[in-house]
Image (cartoon, rainbow, N blue to C red):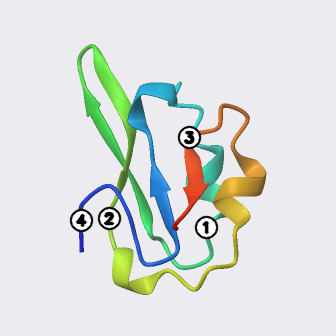
């Protein structure tokens, strides 16, 4: 599994503004944080736990998430 996707969704970290809304919305702790000085965005932490609930897609105001094709 790629580090920027699960079997159900993929992420574009360039759109992430580090609001962390998706982390709070995810019921399975699939999404984590990268916080290094000037480098802040989300990452896929536990991709195998993704259940395709789409809460991350619905919550993100910046279009970071896309459904996997």
Within-10-Å neighbours for mark 3: few <14, some 14–19, many 20+:
some
* Relative image position of residue 10 (x, y in whole percent): 46, 57
What residue do we see at 40% from left, 36% from top?
A: 13
Q: Nearer the viewer, mark 3 or mark 1?
A: 3
Q: Which mark is residue 64?
A: 3
What residue do we see at 58% from left, 53% from top?
A: 66
Quickly name the residue at label 2: 45
Callout 1: SS = loop
Question: Which is more N-terminal, label 1 or label 3?
Answer: 1
Q: Is residue 52 above or below residue 21?
A: below
Question: Which is more N-terminal, label 2 or label 1?
Answer: 1
Judging depth in this view, the residue of 23 and 44 nearest the camera is 44
What residue do we see at 61% from left, 67% from top?
A: 26
Callout 4: SS = loop
Question: Which is more N-terminal, label 1 or label 4?
Answer: 4
Q: Are marks 2 and 4 in contact (CB under 8 Å)?
A: no
How far apart are the alpha carbons under marks 1 and 2?
Answer: 11 Å
Q: Which mark is residue 1?
A: none
Question: Which is more N-terminal, label 3 or label 4?
Answer: 4
How far apart are the alpha carbons under marks 4 and 1?
Answer: 19 Å
Quickly name the residue at label 4: 2
Judging depth in this view, the residue of 39 and 58 nearest the camera is 58
Q: Which mark is residue 26?
A: 1
Judging depth in this view, the residue of 43 and 9 nearest the camera is 9
Within-10-Å neighbours for mark 2: few <14, some 14–19, many 20+:
some
How far apart are the alpha carbons under marks 3 and 1?
Answer: 14 Å
Q: Is residue 30 above or below residue 39?
A: below
Q: Nearer the viewer, mark 2 or mark 3?
A: 3
Q: Are marks 4 and 3 in contact (CB under 8 Å)?
A: no
Question: Which is more N-terminal, label 3 or label 2?
Answer: 2
Q: Quadrant of the N terminus?
A: bottom left
């Amino acid at each position: 599994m790629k580090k920027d996707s699960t079997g159900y969704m993929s992420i574009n970290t360039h759109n992430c503004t580090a609001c962390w809304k998706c982390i709070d919305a995810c019921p399975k702790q699939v999404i984590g944080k990268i916080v290094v000085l000037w480098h802040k965005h989300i990452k896929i932490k536990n991709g195998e736990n993704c259940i395709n609930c789409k809460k991350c897609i619905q919550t993100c105001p910046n279009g970071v998430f896309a459904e996997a094709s």
